[in-house]
Amino acid sequence: MRCLESSQRGVAVGRGNAAAPIRRGPVARPRLATVVRVATDSEALPGPQGAFVDGQEAEARQGIFNRIAPVYDELNNNLSFGQHWVWKQMTVKWSGAKPGGKALDVCCGSGDIAFLLARAVGTKGEVTGLDFAAEMLQDASARQDDQRREGTAQGRANIKWVQGDAMDLPFESASFDAATMGYGLRNVASQPTALKELHRVLKPGCSVAILDFNNCTDPIPDAIQAFFLEQLVVPAARRYGLAAEYEYLRPSIKRFPTGPEQERLAREAGFAAARHYPIGFDLMGVLVATKGR
């Protein structure tokens, strides 16, 4: 779950270094009665106000991830029974990150995948973690600082944390040897735009691996996912006063493109090859897209 849009072009974030506030663009005014009706229907969906309303989703979703940052890692680990680490390791493997390479993790959150990428590229490689939520980036930087004080390999990793927009990446074209995105594509205002940006910053022949909930069309996994989210995840989040933030999950998944639709969007964004892999009993999925040479 992460990253949407921020007009902040690219702000490096470190512990104790508060990121510059995100500038908000003007909210588009509805011009037709049908637009007003759609916005009203969107506002009726579970989750924080504005999370599904055109022109308001960026601010609303950024607020979600800033608010859940203090408990994000704990809930992820407990509610997935630790399986999220398996899914994230698969994502890094499918990205093709190699020793000495330069890797990008978009919508990095508190840094789980970025730290795994750093392990893959080694001490001679470089990792950039980008997110639009300042609180998440502060957590990621703090985690690295803690590891550095303990003298671990993770603490010595060459990672740069940047606050920025997944739909307007502040990097030169053909800059990265591998890219990942964990629980972020579902949350951007324009998935085609985010995919085009990922295609732009990858070097020819390189891949991005995108992990997220799977909008499964099979009714059995879909019912299991609904039960898990509504009967387990939301009640657990309610104990932290974050029920609305986690009620956002289910409708966001059902509005997310299916695996075949993601493959089509990736090819339309310019990728030469794209394949979506359902994992975790079809509850999760990883889209692997490769740029042509």
Image: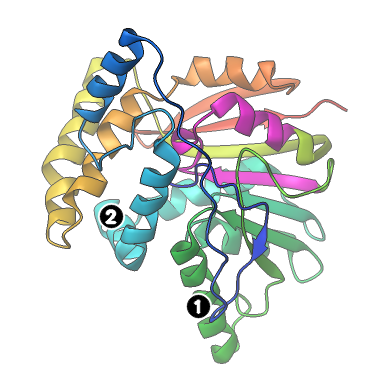
Which portion, as a residue range, is magenta?
Answer: 176-199
Quarter the C terminus occupies: top right
Question: Residue at position x 74%, y 66% from top?
Answer: 122
Residue shown at 52%/65% (left/top)?
137
Please tell me in which quadrant of the rendered image residue 290 appears.
Answer: top right
Residue 140 image position (x, y, % from top left): 51, 69
Q: Which mark is residue 259?
A: none
Residue 284, given in percent of the width and then of the height, sits at 39, 35
Secondary structure beneath dot 2 equals: loop
Q: Is residue 1 visible?
A: no
Query: Residue at (34%, 51%) from the top-left corner?
Result: 64
Corner quadrant of residue 46: top left
Which residue corresponds to mark 2?
A: 81
> At numbered mark 1, what does the secondary structure look like: helix, strand or loop?
helix
Judge the density around disc 2: few (<14), some (14-19), many (≥20) Cα neighbours within 10 Å: few
Q: Along the horizontal axis of the image, is 232 left or right of 25?
A: left
Q: In the rendered picture of this protein, how many numbered marks are placed on residues? A: 2
In the image, residue 94 lies at what x, y percent? 63, 40
Relative to 258, residue 71 above or below:
below
Q: Amino acid at mark 1?
A: Ala
Q: Between marks 2 and 1, how big is the CA–CA gap?
A: 24 Å
- Decide if residue 68 is in sight here: yes
Query: Which amino acid, by three-letter code, is at mark 2?
Result: Phe
**Residue at the right extreme, as displayed:** 293
Question: Is 223 covered by the magenta stretch?
Answer: no
Quadrant (top left, top right, bottom left, bottom right) of the N terminus: top left
Which residue carries the number 1 mark?
142
Give the camera-side residue of 276 and 14: 14
